């Protein structure tokens, strides 16, 4: 097997073994009783992958453009481009839907292994070195702290971990004038897979290219222009997904806006070591072998000064940029992110590994195999750093460890593993490179990597469960609930709401049905505002919307069945998806959700309590958005979790008023509404008389046959940007999609096209045209030059191979 292929396979294997081994030590799913269902992994990634499974198997309500399951009907392409556009995501369809958590875990491990192989290939491409050193350093990159602590429960980010070495490889092609067609295609795949981390990886690859141009004396304006064109063309190819994602963010409910505050320097240094954790500190851990090799480079007198100082300087510059406000914003596309503020940390890990590769031991196959990637040694340096370089690098690492001692995130295990790893790697570098000593050196370095990465994985697993929100893992109870919802499903005649208690933030995607619950970076602002006005609850400052269990909203949104109290409950007080309201202005919401529901319904159905108690026979509803704790009416108790601006408790039922004068016990200030179900049935019957006689939903729209007479057709779906209707432009009716009807109009036909899709398709077509035009011009020039001509880079490549 060629050395490069051997290196890539070994690095992938080491990465998979370290991740799975650490999870096994922590006894975390799928190797033990502790689950992984924390934060966005449970709320977003597993449910979205379950929905992708349904899409690929033809079982979803909706399509690539429109999702009819979550949020009462929302744009799906931005969610697809944010969470599911990775080339690895469709692999979840290979397993049964009930095993989606296993599938997401397998994809996570696979992405980590591919990132290791990609970095290893890049290292072999950049220069010679022992094949096992390339494997260890490539795996060290994939097993960086950012990957183990952050990427493992944000698996979409791991595509950025893969993108950085791929984009650096594109930079090499640009520098050499090679692969003019493949380069933009690689850029496009990286940006489609996950635009957010691909943006950071592109910035990192640009910095690496600048250093490469400087150390190889190939700094040319035309190369920079070629790099810009390659990147721009690749982004253009990705535009059909990229632009809807960007515009989806523009129409989304705003998240938390906070000022960036750099962490203490001691914490920053401590996170370079294994077995540390902190949600708001940079997960900068890389194997001690990387730190030692990178720190030893300035002490290598056999390396030209420019190379000896530019690579460490790049590491220092990237680290410093993470701590300065303006460059922090640049790394994060000029928006301080919600949650962890150091999402670009993998770029620092990447440049540390690239710096370390400049100083590896070079025995055991220093030159790449014939025809393999990468030049031979350019400077005639020795096959390993001398004792002076090893001693200097070890001293620098020791200083970093000592400087991190005051940090509270430092653990005894961090000091023990860092010290042991430093001794092992330094000893390996000083060993002879022949025979058994070479094998011993490889075992010492590889053991350091596996030990530190596995321990860091296990520690992060335990700390995440202790510090982050966690949710019930999927099991028999959830499978029973999903089966019951599927049996009750009647879409589009009526909606089936997955109900309460919640399993995660996107229960309609995870369990089935069609509900209001929805959590995404693209939660539409109009959806949040509408649900808020009607008494809905939310967390994550309005982006994580909860389902609303209320007879009035069930009627308005056509909910005919819902999960409640361990089973499916059906109701006949529901409306079709499309109703016709009389001419007149749309409802103007006020502060009371009880009154807002009545405005949207068009009838008064709530009574005010008398002396703090409702009339006997009415259902008592409580609106206490900021209350936290139990609320009771008789023997019925419900628990509230409110407190704006972070979260808001939903309107809840306290049950029916069974006796006169019975007052509820409340955990805080709130308002009561007494629902008269008789009035509600009368109001629903009146609206049914003016409802659609036929409704057809499609993966990208809705059609309905309406009674004659004119008025305003109202669709029980939020009026999000992207709706287009035949005959008249769509308007909003209490936050819902509406169309004004002429007197003789009896049909409604609306389609949904995410904002930015048309412009993205045009940009993509332009990028394809530019690629084809460029390919044609190159072919024409080759024909004119004759059969003996070749790429400009060939003489350089031949010279490098001859070294």
Image (cartoon, rainbow, N blue to C red):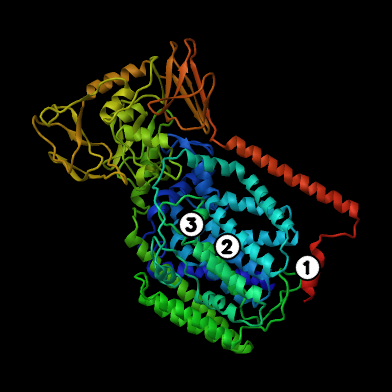
Please tell me which residue is depicted at 50% across the width and 66% down the height of the picture: 319
Q: Which residue is mark 1?
A: 797
Query: Which label number is shown at residue 114?
Result: 2
Viewer-nearest of discs 2 and 3: 3
**In the rendering, at what x and y percent does residue 139 appear?**
55, 69
Q: Which residue is mark 3?
A: 328
Q: CA distance from mark 2 to mark 3?
A: 28 Å
Category of crowding for the residue at label 1, using alpha-carbon neighbours closer than 10 angstroms: few (below 14), some (14–19), many (at least 20): few
Q: Which quadrant holds residue 467?
A: bottom left
Please tell me which residue is depicted at 41% across the width and 37% down the height of the picture: 525
N-terminal-most mark, 2 or 3 = 2
Front in this rendered view, residue 190 or 268: 268
Q: Quadrant of the N terminus?
A: bottom right
Q: CA distance from mark 1 to mark 3?
A: 38 Å
Please tell me which residue is depicted at 66% across the width and 62% down the height of the picture: 169
Please tell me which residue is depicted at 56% across the width and 75% down the height of the picture: 294
Q: Secondary structure at mark 1?
A: helix
Q: Which quadrant holds residue 10?
A: bottom right
Q: CA distance from mark 1 to mark 2?
A: 27 Å
Front in this rendered view, residue 63 or 342: 342
* Left or right: residue 234 compared with residue 325: right
Q: Is residue 316 above or below residue 643?
A: below
Q: Let me know if residue 22 appears in the view.
A: yes
Give the total of numbered labels: 3
Q: Is residue 723 above or below residue 367?
A: above
Do labels 1 and 3 touch, CB within 8 Å? no
């Amino acid at each position: 097997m060629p050395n490069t292929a051997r290196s890539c396979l070994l690095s992938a294997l080491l990465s998979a073994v370290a991740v799975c081994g650490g999870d096994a030590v922590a006894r975390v799913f799928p190797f033990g009783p502790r689950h992984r269902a924390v934060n966005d992994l449970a709320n977003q990634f597993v449910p979205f992958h379950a929905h992708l499974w349904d899409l690929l198997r033809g079982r979803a309500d909706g399509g690539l453009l429109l999702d009819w399951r979550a949020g009462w009907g929302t744009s799906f392409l931005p969610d697809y481009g944010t969470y599911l556009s990775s080339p690895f995501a469709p692999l979840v369809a290979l397993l049964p839907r009930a095993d989606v958590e296993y599938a997401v875990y397998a994809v996570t491990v696979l992405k980590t292994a591919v990132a290791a192989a990609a970095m290893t290939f890049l290292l072999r491409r950049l220069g010679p070195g022992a094949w096992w050193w390339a494997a260890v350093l490539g795996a060290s990159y994939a097993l960086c702290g950012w990957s183990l602590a952050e990427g493992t429960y944000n698996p979409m980010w791991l595509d950025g971990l893969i993108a950085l070495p791929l984009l650096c490889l594109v930079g090499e092609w640009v520098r050499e004038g090679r692969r003019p067609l493949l380069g933009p295609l690689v850029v496009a795949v990286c940006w489609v897979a996950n635009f957010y981390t691909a943006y950071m990886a592109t910035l990192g690859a640009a910095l690496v290219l600048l250093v490469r141009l400087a150390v190889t004396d190939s700094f040319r304006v035309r190369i920079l222009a070629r790099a810009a064109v390659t990147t721009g063309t690749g982004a253009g190819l990705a535009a059909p997904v990229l632009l809807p994602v960007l515009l989806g963010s523009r129409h989304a409910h705003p998240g938390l806006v906070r000022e960036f505050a750099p962490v203490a320097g001691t914490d920053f240094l401590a996170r370079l070591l294994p077995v540390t954790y902190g949600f708001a500190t940079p997960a900068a851990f890389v194997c001690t072998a990387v730190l030692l090799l990178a720190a030893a480079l300035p002490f290598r007198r056999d390396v030209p000064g420019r190379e000896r100082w530019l690579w460490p300087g790049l590491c220092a510059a990237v680290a410093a940029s993470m701590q300065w406000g303006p460059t922090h914003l640049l790394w994060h596309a000029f928006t301080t992110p919600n949650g962890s503020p150091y999402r670009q940390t993998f770029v620092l890990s990447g440049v540390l590994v690239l710096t370390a590769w400049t100083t590896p031991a070079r025995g055991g196959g220093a030159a790449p195999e014939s025809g393999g990637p990468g030049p031979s040694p350019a400077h005639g340096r020795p096959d390993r750093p001398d004792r002076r370089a090893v001693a200097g690098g070890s001293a620098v690492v020791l200083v970093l460890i000592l400087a991190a001692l005051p940090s509270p995130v430092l653990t005894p295990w961090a000091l023990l593993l860092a010290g042991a790893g430093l001794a092992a790697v330094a000893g390996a570098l000083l060993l002879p490179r022949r025979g058994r000593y070479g094998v011993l050196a490889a075992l010492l370095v590889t053991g350091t990597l596996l030990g530190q990465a596995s321990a860091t994985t296990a520690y992060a697993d335990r700390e995440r469960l202790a510090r982050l929100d966690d949710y019930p893992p999927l099991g028999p109870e959830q499978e029973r609930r999903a089966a019951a919802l599927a049996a009750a499903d009647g879409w589009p005649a009526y909606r089936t709401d997955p109900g309460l208690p919640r399993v995660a933030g996107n229960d309609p995607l995870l369990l089935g049905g069609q509900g209001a619950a929805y959590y995404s970076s693209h939660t539409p602002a109009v959806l949040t505002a509408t649900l808020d006005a009607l008494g809905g609850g939310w967390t994550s400052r309005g982006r994580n919307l909860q389902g609303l269990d209320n007879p009035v909203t069930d009627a308005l949104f056509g909910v005919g069945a819902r999960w409640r109290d361990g089973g499916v409950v059906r109701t006949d007080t529901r409306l079709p998806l499309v109703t016709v309201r009389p001419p007149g202005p749309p409802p103007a919401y006020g502060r009371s959700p009880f009154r807002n529901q009545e405005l949207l319904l068009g009838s008064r159905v709530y009574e005010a309590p008398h002396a703090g108690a409702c009339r006997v026979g009415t259902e008592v509803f409580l609106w206490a958005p900021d209350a936290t704790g139990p609320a009771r009416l008789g023997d019925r108790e419900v628990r509230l979790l409110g407190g704006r601006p972070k979260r808001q408790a939903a309107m809840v039922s306290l049950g029916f008023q069974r006796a006169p004068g019975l007052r509820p016990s409340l955990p805080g200030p709130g308002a009561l509404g007494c629902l008269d179900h008789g009035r509600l049935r009368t109001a629903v019957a009146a609206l049914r008389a003016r409802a659609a006689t036929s409704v057809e939903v499609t993966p990208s729209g809705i059609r309905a046959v309406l009674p004659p007479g004119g008025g305003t057709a109202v669709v029980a779906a939020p009026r999000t940007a992207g709706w287009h209707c035949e005959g008249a432009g769509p308007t909003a009716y209490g936050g819902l999609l509406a169309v004004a009807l002429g007197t003789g109009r009896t049909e409604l036909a609306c389609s949904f096209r995410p904002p930015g899709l048309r412009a993205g398709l045009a940009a993509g077509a332009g990028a394809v045209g530019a690629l084809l035009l460029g390919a044609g011009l190159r072919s024409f020039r080759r024909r004119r030059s004759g059969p003996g001509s070749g790429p400009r880079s060939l003489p350089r490549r031949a010279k490098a191979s001859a070294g």
